Amino acid sequence: MSQALRAASVAKAWAASASRRVCESAMQVHGGMGYTWECDVHLYLRSAQLCGAAFGDEMACLDSVSGFVFAG
Protein backbone atom coordinates (compact mmCIF):
# COMPACT_ATOMS: atom_id res chain seq x y z
CA MET A 1 0.00 0.00 0.00
CA SER A 2 1.40 3.37 -0.96
CA GLN A 3 1.76 6.20 1.49
CA ALA A 4 -0.93 8.22 -0.29
CA LEU A 5 -3.45 5.39 -0.05
CA ARG A 6 -2.58 4.81 3.60
CA ALA A 7 -2.96 8.53 4.37
CA ALA A 8 -6.30 8.64 2.55
CA SER A 9 -7.55 5.63 4.52
CA VAL A 10 -6.58 7.21 7.83
CA ALA A 11 -8.16 10.54 6.83
CA LYS A 12 -11.40 8.88 5.73
CA ALA A 13 -11.66 6.84 8.92
CA TRP A 14 -11.09 9.91 11.08
CA ALA A 15 -13.36 12.22 9.07
CA ALA A 16 -16.21 9.70 8.91
CA SER A 17 -16.12 9.21 12.66
CA ALA A 18 -15.84 12.92 13.41
CA SER A 19 -18.64 13.96 11.04
CA ARG A 20 -21.02 11.35 12.44
CA ARG A 21 -20.17 12.36 16.01
CA VAL A 22 -20.68 16.08 15.26
CA CYS A 23 -24.02 15.50 13.54
CA GLU A 24 -25.27 13.28 16.36
CA SER A 25 -24.30 15.98 18.88
CA ALA A 26 -26.06 18.64 16.81
CA MET A 27 -29.17 16.45 16.73
CA GLN A 28 -29.13 16.25 20.53
CA VAL A 29 -28.53 19.98 20.92
CA HIS A 30 -31.48 20.82 18.67
CA GLY A 31 -33.68 18.25 20.37
CA GLY A 32 -36.98 17.49 18.66
CA MET A 33 -36.48 20.30 16.18
CA GLY A 34 -33.57 18.34 14.67
CA TYR A 35 -36.05 15.88 13.18
CA THR A 36 -38.29 18.48 11.54
CA TRP A 37 -38.03 20.24 8.21
CA GLU A 38 -37.39 23.54 10.00
CA CYS A 39 -33.84 22.44 10.78
CA ASP A 40 -31.53 20.63 8.34
CA VAL A 41 -29.61 18.65 10.97
CA HIS A 42 -31.28 15.38 10.01
CA LEU A 43 -30.13 15.86 6.41
CA TYR A 44 -26.55 16.41 7.54
CA LEU A 45 -26.70 13.27 9.69
CA ARG A 46 -27.96 11.20 6.77
CA SER A 47 -25.25 12.62 4.54
CA ALA A 48 -22.57 11.85 7.14
CA GLN A 49 -23.81 8.26 7.46
CA LEU A 50 -23.89 7.79 3.68
CA CYS A 51 -20.43 9.29 3.14
CA GLY A 52 -19.05 7.19 5.99
CA ALA A 53 -20.30 4.01 4.33
CA ALA A 54 -19.11 4.92 0.83
CA PHE A 55 -15.89 3.26 -0.34
CA GLY A 56 -15.61 1.18 2.83
CA ASP A 57 -16.60 2.05 6.34
CA GLU A 58 -14.34 3.23 9.14
CA MET A 59 -13.32 -0.27 10.23
CA ALA A 60 -12.44 -1.33 6.68
CA CYS A 61 -10.13 1.68 6.30
CA LEU A 62 -8.46 1.04 9.64
CA ASP A 63 -8.07 -2.67 8.81
CA SER A 64 -6.24 -1.82 5.60
CA VAL A 65 -3.90 0.53 7.47
CA SER A 66 -3.25 -1.99 10.24
CA GLY A 67 -2.48 -4.65 7.65
CA PHE A 68 0.22 -2.40 6.24
CA VAL A 69 1.62 -1.42 9.63
CA PHE A 70 1.78 -4.92 11.13
CA ALA A 71 2.85 -6.69 7.92
CA GLY A 72 6.14 -5.05 7.57
Image (cartoon, helix red, strand yellow):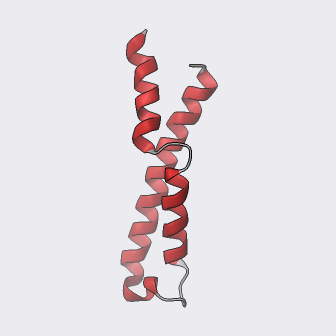
Coordinates of residue 53 in the picture (x, y in percent): 49, 51
In which quadrant of the rendered view does residue 66 lie?
A: top left
The front one of 29 and 54 is: 54
Residue drawn at x 57%, y 30% is: 7
Circle count:
0
The front one of 43 and 54 is: 54
Coordinates of residue 21 in the picture (x, y in percent): 41, 60
Relative to 23, residue 16 above or below: above
Coordinates of residue 26 in the picture (x, y in percent): 44, 73
Coordinates of residue 72 in the picture (x, y in percent): 43, 9
Which quadrant is home to the N terminus? top right
Residue drawn at x 43%, y 51% is: 17
The front one of 7 and 54 is: 54
Residue drawn at x 38%, y 88% is: 32
Relative to 60, residue 25 above or below: below
Seen as rendered, the residue at the extreme right is 4
Residue drawn at x 41%, y 12% is: 71
